[in-house]
Amino acid sequence: GAVVSQHPSRVICKSGTSVKIECRSLDFQATTMFWYRQFPKQSLMLMATSNEGSKATYEQGVEKDKFLINHASLTLSTLTVTSAHPEDSSFYICSARDRAGGPDTQYFGPGTRLTVL
Amino acid sequence: GQQLNQSPQSMFIQEGEDVSMNCTSSSIFNTWLWYKQDPGEGPVLLIALYKAGELTSNGRLTAQFGITRKDSFLNISASIPSDVGIYFCAGQLKSNYQLIWGAGTKLIIKP
């Protein structure tokens, strides 16, 4: 149980295009999902907290118009990197909070490697 | 801001040795979590701790939630090659469920 998937796992795009990354909780409902960015050899950096049915809360320094987050259902959140540039190249990871039937725990997706040319 | 100090930064050990790593914080957390991350993958939850003083095992892994709620350790007994990877501690805030992360401990097993 407690499986989180991400799609795509890898994406290469041209500068100026937009890229959508999906995060799904496969066997539980996630009212809260988190989006992280990870640079090589570093820890995870929280970008935003996504609550189902409401606007995402962005961390300081993260542009909400650049990184659009939609959490339309209890099992799906999407992150869209708009007008991507090479500096947006990174490893993007989502996590989902499972609160039903037990202690509060976060489970992570496998990550999406974004390369902007 | 809140920070977690995780040590050591890296460990070079022989197969079969025991491993110990820890995290300390200036803040109190309600939950401590330990994750392992392999290259190109997302973190995988190893152990979750919810009560101060709690000692929890998962196979060869044992972790404890410090009494002060400001620290936690993870032990791995009889290490094997598949234990290599980066281990992260994370403290969870009850207010918004955000995770505060340690910098990671890279475990390398010498052949």
Image (cartoon, rainbow, N blue to C red):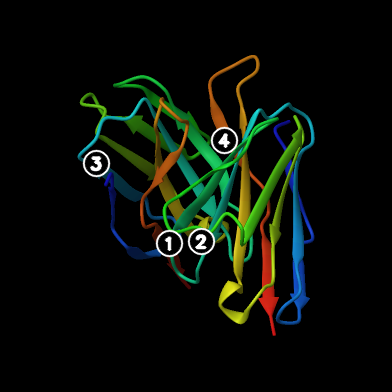
Q: Can residue A35 be seen by looking at this rendering?
A: yes
Which residue is at a point 68% across and 30% down the rendered structure image? Answer: A30
Q: Secondary structure at mark 2?
A: loop
Q: In which quarter of the view is residue A33 placed?
A: top right
Label 2 resides on the chain identified as B
Quickly name the residue at label 2: B84
**SS state under label 4:** strand
- Kindly tell me whether residue B76 is visible in this rendering: no
Determine the CA span between mark 1 and mark 2. 5 Å
Identity of the residue furthest to the bottom in this view:
A117
Of marks 1 and 4, the one in the foreground: 4
Residue at x 50% of width, y 46% of height: B35
Residue with the mark numbered 4: A106
Q: Are marks 1 and 2 in contact (CB under 8 Å)?
A: yes
Amino acid, disc 2:
Val
Q: Which residue is identified by label 3?
A: B25
Mark 1 = which residue?
Answer: B107
Q: Position of residue A71 (x, y in %)?
A: 71, 38
Please state which of residues A116 and B50 is positioned toward the viewer in this rendering. Answer: A116
User: Which chain is indicated by disc 1?
Assistant: B
- The tag earlier along the polypeptide, 3 or 1, is 3
Q: Is residue B24 left or right of residue A100?
A: left
Query: Badge 2, how many Cα within 10 Å: few under 14, some, many 20+?
Result: some
Say which of A72 and B18 sits in front. Answer: A72
Q: Residue A36: percent from the left, percent from the top? A: 55, 53
Between circles 3 and 1, the one closer to the viewer is: 3
